[in-house]
Structures are given as structure tokens and as C-alpha cells.
């Protein structure tokens, strides 16, 4: 395989143009009406939230400025209109703490329940969930009333198995309605959910169960994807063996949903039942469909979600009941211009933050219909998304650039077959969207009539932090444009931490940080507050550090140019190089490993692993296969390296630190800008590695 010369995608973005769509038709620089989006903001429904009452970019600027100047007023007012409180928060205690001390609290003392806000307060007859399984005819529609009953029964089932307020429940499930219901049932009783993406391996699941000292695991016997059965139960069995070998009595119960359970399902168990297993469908069927929502402090943990960093084990990012719920609700409403009756489809998996905020919490807190999707964009064929949009009259569709690029490759034939006129907003998330994919999404999917929102955010931010708003702010292909309300972005110089002054064109370039706390900011990492401080707050005193580099143009548009740490973004999934490296060195042949990202047409980035072998081991196709397998079993199949390079040694400084920067440049084909290699213990190794990579 010949190495493709790396493309610096970010440069292409800078020549892009500004496009505005919006029902209320306003433009930045023209006085004539601009392209108007088909339905955005045209619904005639009185709205209580700020964005609906503004009709121009200037007003966005005004509200944004106000939200930054007086965040307590901005968020305090919204918290009252957007959420139902059991005990109101004190107006003098809306925001406490700061980014210097790392003790941020929003609405502390106020009491509410996130599940109540997401379900009970809405019209019981409205549709809460439309689920479409792997097969297009596997459809379930669930009303808010049915959700309250089922989630209450699940809450009682969890209680019956000993789950109490504050306990962590690990959820390892396919994208079926019971996944969202189990999350909400935890929220209802004040338990903390920790969803682990069902693509993670047994090892990865076990380490997350152990790290959170979790006594109850909820899973399903299998999932379905692209016509294949995913045997989740066996993975859980292996994970439980690993957990038991470390802490024998930790997990008390494994609650197992049956993917194909029907009310008339028989006593025959469709999987190998272990001692701790409980048939969840049967347990739930025995419970009363009533469970009073637990009053939770706004600052009580709603959930944790493990995410990868540049070093060490994944961090359990902690989100709170009050602040996160408000931020999820508010960003969903604003970014997607939600209106009653909307069918909102975020096709992300609940194993990631996008699924938490936009499949479950944000959409349900707003009372719209959320769409849950179990399958892939190309099953049974590449028209799947468009077919779903037509059949369910989806109004907002939210996916990742990797899926857009994949579907774009198939061309427009499938697209032409379907009526997509229900669409109002198309969203993109997870990584920078290249202008070519952006234009295809806008022009071919949206027929140049639907707003495309490029939403930039992170697991730690809880919801969008930089995005254009339909009908409110202009779009710019390749740019996530402007900060959300309440988000005070700054561009810092990584060498000294100062705010970067604009150059002669009014542009700034540096690392992206945020100057002020917002309600959705993660409060800590489970059991390791000092790590939270070290990663997010200490790098630049007084700021939240995103870990991303950015360029901001003279108009204020943000262009994210990539991570500055050793985090790789594969298909919109954040992968820590450290985890893949630790997996590789567990193989007896590997002495040292270094993992870097490599540009990939569809996935954005692919994984490239450099391995140095121990004495006595030789490179062979079998060994490469074994190394791939090692990563699959230790972390998960979605982290399998695209390329493994066996190198005689790795580029290291004299003090033994691997210089990944050099490896990154080599795999990107940027060998003419390698920079200073004189600090390497053995500078000659660079040429050897370049030759090796070029020969692959
Ligand atoms: C990282 C966060 C947030 C949901 C999915 C990923 C990258 C995310 C964008 C975007 C450019 C983006 C950043 C960020 N990223 N969205 N619209 N434009 N980059 O969540 O796993 O926490 O990863 O994804 O690098 O830091 P995550």
C-alpha cells in the first residue's frame, strides 16, 4: 500500500463562503432576502425561549453578549422556564465557584428530577420515541405516557435489585428503546448511569465497571447491526469473569434484556444464564408502573461517561442533574430550532455523549419525538437514512461527517428516490466537516433549502458550544461558526497562554478555551478531581481548555483545526492513543508502541500504530494480525489500527520520551516539515521509519 500524501483539510475551509438560510430571511452582508430555509422558524407557535424571539444576527450578538455579561441572569431565567423544579433554587446561588478553583456549581440547593422533566410533564398521548431496528420494518412507537409507565417499572426493578440513589449502574446495550428507558429509570431513582458503548471489548467494559465500583450491570442478550447478530451477552460474561478476578463480590446482578422479547415470550432463556443474571423483561413485567421521581439536588450527578484522554485510563466525566439538563434542553431547542410535533433524529449511539444529550435528554426534555436507530447508514442499502426521513417525516436529522462522506461516495441515485421535504435542519457533529461534504449535505440532501448546523462540542461540555443557529446566524461551510449563548470562547497562544491578537486580516489562530463556566460543563472526573484540574483547568489558568486548536476569521467564525493532544478522532469517536498503545504492549512480542492518527478519506482519521519488537521476535503477516486482534480484544473493534508499522526502534528523546509528533508527520506525508530532530537519541532512525512507511 502506498501512503497517501496528507491533505491539510483546514486550509480548504478558509476559502469557503457564507450562506444564510432562515425563515425570517436575514443576511449578513446583503439587503435582499437570502435563501430561505423551507420551514425553519416558520412555525407559528409562541415560544418561551430567547432564540425564537430574535430574528437577526445582530440580535444573536446582543443576546450572546448579555449571556456572557450576566450569565446568572441568562441561565437563571432559562432554568425557570425550561425545567420544572421540586424546590426552586436560590436566586443568589445560581452560579457558585469558578474555573480557577474548579468548583463550579449551578443552581445548587434547587431540587429536580431529570426523568420527570424528560417524561412526566409532557402530554402523555404525544409520541416520545420512534424506534427503528436493524430491519426497516422493525418499528416501535412509544408515547410519553407509555414511557412514564415503563420507565417507572424499570425503576422499581432496579430498586428491587438493590440499586439506591447515588449508586452507579453500568449499561452495555444495543440501540433499543430499553437502553434510553434504563438510563431514564436510573435518573428517576437518583442512580448514576454509566453507559459503555456496546462496541467496547470485555476488557474495556470490565475496567469501567471496576473503576466505578458498580454493583449492577444492565445489558441485552444481543443487538443487531447490518443483518448481523452482536452477541453482547458473551462479552458481558467475559467482562464479569475479569471483574470477579479482581473484586469477586463487586457485581451483584446482571440484568439482561432480551432483544426479541415479546409479551408472550416463553420461559426458555435465549442465552446461557449465569448465576448473577436476571431476566430483565420478566422482572420489569412484575413491577408496578408507578415510581415517584427522586428529588435530586441540581448538583447531584446525573451520569458519568467514560471518555479517552491523551494519557492513561479513560476518565469518568461527571455531569449533573440541573446544569446538564438545562444545557441539553436549551442547545437542542436552539440549534435544531425545535418545535412541537417535530420528529428529531440523531442517529448517534447512546454509548457516546451525542446519544446522551441529543437522542435522550435534550429531545425528551423538550417534549418532541426522538428517533432511535439501531442499524447502519448502508443497511440494507445506502438509501436507509433517506428512506427513514421519508417514512417517519423526520424534521431534524443529525449525523457525523464520516457518514456523510460515506454516503456521498455512493452518489445521488439513492437520494433521488426519496421525499425529504419534511426536513428543516441537518446537523453534523464529531469532527470538522470538510466543505465538499458540507456542500453535498446542504445541496443534495437539503436541496439548498435546509439549514446545515455544524455543531462543535465535547463529552465534557455536555452540549454544543460552537454552532450556527438556523434562521439566526449564518452558515459557513467547514466552520462551526459562532459560540452558543453563554459560551465565552477565547483563542489562546499555546506558548504563553495569552489571548491571541488578530493578525492584519483580523484572524487569530491558537488553542480554543472558554473563559466562563456554563451549566453543562463537566464538574469532575469520577474519583479523580486532580486529573480534571490537570487536564482542563490548569493548562491555562482561569479557562476551560478544550484540547483543540482553532482559527477564527475576522467575522468571528471558528474553524476547528484538530486536537493538540494525543487524541485521535476516528469516525467522530474519540480514541486515546494511550489505550491502543497499552493494548499493543500486552502482546508478548511488543517492546514499545506509539500510535498516531493518519488522514482517512471516510473516517477523518485512521489509526496508525508503530511497534518495536522484543529481541527474538520477527515481523510477519501473522504477527500483524495478532496485534490487530489484541487491540480488538483489549479495547474494541472500532479501534483496530488501519496500519501497523514494525520499526527497529521508535523516535525517542534522550530521556526516553517517544516523539509522536515526528511519527504523525511521517504518516501524513509531511516529511519535509519534520522540524528539529536533533534532540532525538538516534536521529538516523527517522529515515529508516520513513523508508519503512513508504514501502508499505
Ligand atoms: C472532540 C470531542 C461532541 C460529540 C462527539 C464527539 C471533535 C466534535 C466537532 C465539530 C470539529 C469537532 C473535537 C472535540 N469535534 N465536533 N463540529 N467540528 N471538531 O465527542 O468524543 O468528546 O470528542 O471531537 O476535536 O474536541 P468527543
Image (spheres, helix red, strand yellow):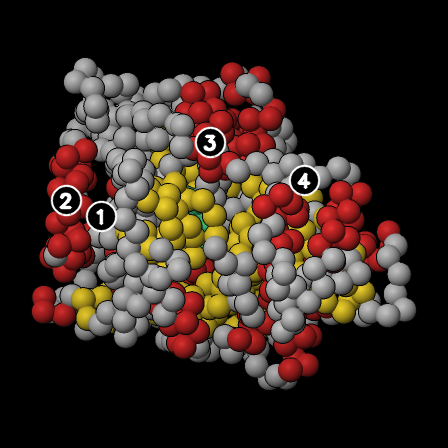
Of the residues under marks 2 and 4, which one precedes in the sequence?
2
Element class at badge 1? loop
Vertical placement of residue 555 versus 102, above or below = above
Residue 182 at x, y = what percent? 45, 60
Of the residues under marks 4 and 3, which one precedes in the sequence?
3
Please give the residue where the numbered disc 4 appears in the rendered image.
227
Element class at badge 4? loop
Q: Evaluate whether residue 508 shows in this view.
A: yes
Q: Nearer the viewer, mark 4 or mark 1?
A: 1
Q: Residue at x 74, y 51 (%)?
A: 687
Residue 545 at x, y = what percent? 37, 60
> Crowding near pointer 1: few (<14 within 10 Å), some, many (20+)?
many
Relative to the observer, which residue lies in front, 627 or 172? Answer: 627
Of the residues under marks 4 and 1, which one precedes in the sequence?
4
Disc 1 residue: CB within 8 Å of ligand 1? no
Q: Residue at x 76, y 63 (%)?
A: 649
Please give the residue where the numbered disc 3 appears in the rendered image.
12
Quadrant of the rendered structure where residue 505 is? Answer: top left
Q: Nearer the viewer, mark 3 or mark 2?
A: 3
Amino acid at each position: 500500500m502506498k501512503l497517501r500524501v496528507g491533505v491539510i483539510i483546514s486550509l480548504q475551509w478558509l476559502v469557503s463562503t457564507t450562506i444564510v438560510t432562515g425563515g425570517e430571511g436575514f443576511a449578513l452582508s446583503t439587503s435582499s432576502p437570502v435563501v430561505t430555509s423551507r420551514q425553519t422558524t416558520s412555525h407559528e407557535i409562541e415560544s418561551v425561549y430567547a432564540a425564537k424571539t430574535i430574528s437577526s444576527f445582530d440580535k444573536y450578538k446582543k443576546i450572546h453578549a448579555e449571556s456572557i455579561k450576566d450569565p446568572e441572569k441568562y441561565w437563571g431565567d432559562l432554568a425557570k422556564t425550561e425545567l420544572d423544579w421540586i424546590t426552586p433554587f436560590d436566586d443568589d446561588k445560581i452560579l457558585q465557584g469558578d474555573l480557577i478553583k474548579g468548583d463550579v456549581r449551578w443552581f445548587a440547593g434547587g431540587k429536580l428530577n431529570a426523568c420527570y422533566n424528560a417524561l412526566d410533564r409532557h402530554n402523555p398521548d404525544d409520541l416520545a420515541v420512534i424506534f427503528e431496528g436493524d430491519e426497516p420494518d422493525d418499528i416501535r412507537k412509544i408515547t410519553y405516557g407509555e414511557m412514564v409507565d415503563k420507565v417507572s417499572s424499570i425503576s422499581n426493578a432496579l430498586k428491587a435489585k438493590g440499586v439506591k440513589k447515588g449508586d452507579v449502574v453500568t449499561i452495555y446495550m444495543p440501540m433499543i428503546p430499553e437502553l434510553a428507558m434504563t438510563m431514564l429509570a436510573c435518573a428517576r431513582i437518583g442512580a448514576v448511569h454509566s453507559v459503555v458503548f456496546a462496541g467496547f471489548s470485555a476488557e474495556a467494559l470490565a475496567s469501567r465497571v471496576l473503576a466505578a465500583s458498580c454493583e449492577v450491570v444492565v445489558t441485552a442478550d444481543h443487538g443487531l447491526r447490518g443483518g448481523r447478530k452482536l452477541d453482547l451477552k458473551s462479552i458481558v460474561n467475559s467482562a464479569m469473569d475479569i471483574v470477579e478476578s479482581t473484586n469477586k463480590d463487586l457485581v451483584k446482578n446482571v440484568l439482561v434484556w432480551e432483544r426479541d422479547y415479546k409479551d408472550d415470550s416463553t420461559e426458555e432463556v435465549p442465552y446461557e444464564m449465569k448465576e448473577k443474571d436476571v431476566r430483565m423483561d420478566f422482572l420489569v413485567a412484575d413491577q408496578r408502573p408507578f415510581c415517584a421521581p427522586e428529588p435530586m439536588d441540581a448538583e447531584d450527578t446525573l451520569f458519568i461517561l467514560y471518555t479517552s484522554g491523551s494519557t492513561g485510563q479513560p476518565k469518568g466525566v461527571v455531569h449533573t442533574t440541573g446544569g446538564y439538563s438545562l444545557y441539553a434542553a436549551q442547545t437542542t431547542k436552539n440549534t435544531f430550532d425545535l418545535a412541537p410535533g417535530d420528529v428529531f433524529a440523531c442517529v448517534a449511539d447512546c454509548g457516546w455523549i451525542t446519544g446522551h444529550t441529543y437522542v435522550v435528554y435534550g429531545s425528551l426534555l423538550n417534549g418532541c419525538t426522538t428517533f432511535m436507530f439501531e442499524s447502519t447508514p448502508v443497511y440494507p442499502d445506502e438509501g436507509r437514512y433517506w428512506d427513514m426521513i421519508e417514512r417517519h417525516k423526520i424534521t431534524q436529522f443529525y449525523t457525523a461527517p464520516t457518514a456523510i462522506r460515506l454516503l456521498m461516495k455512493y452518489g445521488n441515485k439513492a437520494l433521488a428516490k426519496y421525499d425529504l421535504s419534511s426536513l428543516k435542519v441537518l446537523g453534523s457533529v464529531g469532527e470538522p466537516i470538510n466543505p465538499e461534504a458540507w456542500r453535498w449535505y446542504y445541496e443534495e440532501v437539503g436541496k439548498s433549502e435546509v439549514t446545515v448546523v455544524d455543531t462543535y462540542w465535547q463529552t465534557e461540555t455536555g452540549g454544543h458550544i460552537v454552532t450556527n443557529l438556523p434562521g439566526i446566524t449564518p452558515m459557513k461551510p467547514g466552520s462551526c461558526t459562532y459560540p452558543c449563548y453563554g459560551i465565552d470562547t477565547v483563542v489562546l497562544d499555546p506558548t504563553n497562554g495569552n489571548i491571541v491578537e488578530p493578525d492584519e486580516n483580523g484572524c487569530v489562530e491558537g488553542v480554543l478555551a472558554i473563559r466562563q463556566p456554563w451549566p453543562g460543563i463537566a464538574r469532575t472526573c469520577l474519583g479523580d478531581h486532580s486529573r480534571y484540574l490537570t487536564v482542563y483547568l490548569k493548562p491555562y489558568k482561569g479557562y476551560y481548555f478544550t484540547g483543540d486548536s482553532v482559527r477564527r476569521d475576522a467575522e468571528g467564525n471558528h474553524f476547528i483545526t484538530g486536537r493538540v493532544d494525543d487524541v485521535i478522532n476516528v469516525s467522530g469517536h474519540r480514541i486515546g492513543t494511550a489505550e491502543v498503545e497499552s493494548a499493543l504492549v500486552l502482546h508478548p512480542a511488543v517492546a514499545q508502541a506509539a500510535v498516531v492518527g493518519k488522514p482517512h478519506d471516510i473516517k477523518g482519521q485512521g489509526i496508525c500504530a508503530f511497534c518495536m519488537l522484543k529481541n527474538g521476535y520477527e515481523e510477519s503477516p501473522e504477527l500483524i494480525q495478532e496485534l490487530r486482534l489484541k487491540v480488538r480484544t483489549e479495547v474494541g473493534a472500532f479501534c483496530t489500527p488501519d496500519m501497523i508499522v514494525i520499526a527497529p526502534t521508535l523516535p525517542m528523546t534522550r530521556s526516553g520520551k517517544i516523539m509522536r509528533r515526528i511519527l504523525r508527520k511521517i504518516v501524513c506525508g509531511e516529511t519535509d516539515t519534520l522540524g528539529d530532530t536533533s534532540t532525538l537519541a538516534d536521529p538516523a532512525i527517522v529515515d529508516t521509519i520513513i523508508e519503512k512507511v513508504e514501502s508499505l
